[in-house]
Image: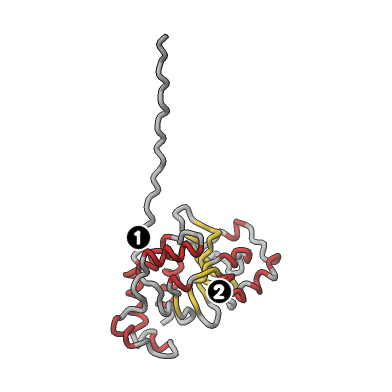
Amino acid sequence: MTTTPRALPVPRTLPVEPPPPAHPWRDLLQRWSDEWLDPALHEQERPEPFPPGVRAARWLGAPGATEGEISALEDRLGAELPPSYRQFLRTTNGWLNTTPEIHRLLPAREVGRLRDLDPGLIEPWTENADAFQVPDEEYYVYGDEQHSHALRPEYLPDTLKISHTPDGDVYLLNPHVVTPSGEWEAWYFAHWLPGAVRHRSFWDLMNDEYESFTHSG
């Protein structure tokens, strides 16, 4: 008896994820450097001048992180970094002032979870966590309509601390809110707000910070 061969299933074509956009970090950061290093604009806002090497290079950053340095950070965190922050590190592995309130962005080797690096920033919020029951319709608001107190303290321990300022103003990346393209929510967190100004990505945060900085002079 002749049997009819079974038809093979039609292969399913999976959608191809587009690569993350290549953000023009070098252009943004060069403009930021030029603004800071102009003595008539912003350098007088620092307690001391920038080091001679920074002034000579006209660059507030450092050489970009290697793929090995970034992979080591991701291995240590057990998570893949958001694309815009990864691109930032490839452009410069650390940075001096973004604004007078943020003294430096950390190199990859110093980045870590907020609970490990600065648990004192978490405690005042988690002790009163019941007072911050923020519904989605209030939480997922970005831009001028957002309220700084509309945050979720339970997210704080897992955030990445990526900057340092002695007074406590800090940039955080929140792995609990991720866009379809892999971007983590990015916070400007400060006690005087009080709370955080939240953005959909690190790229959005830094552009907002640059705009604020250039309009402060």
User: Foreground residue, 108 or 217?
Assistant: 108
**Is residue 143 visible to the viewer in this orientation of the structure?**
no
Q: In the rendering, which numbered label is found on residue 22?
A: 1
In the image, residue 47 above or below residue 186: below
Sequence-first disc among 1 and 2:
1
Q: Amino acid at mark 2?
A: Leu
Q: Residue furthest left?
A: 56
Would you place residue 10 above or below residue 147 in this image?
Answer: above
Q: Which quadrant of the figure has residue 57? A: bottom left
Mark yes or no: residue 13 visible.
Answer: yes
Residue 133: where, in percent of width, then height?
67, 62
- Residue 170 place in picture, x, y as percent: 52, 75
Q: Amino acid at mark 1?
A: Ala
For residue 117, the mark is 2
Nearer mark to the viewer, of 1 and 2: 2
Q: Residue at x 53, y 82 (%)?
A: 166
Please, which residue is most extreme toward the front here? Answer: 1
Is 170 left, or right, of 7 in this rendering? right
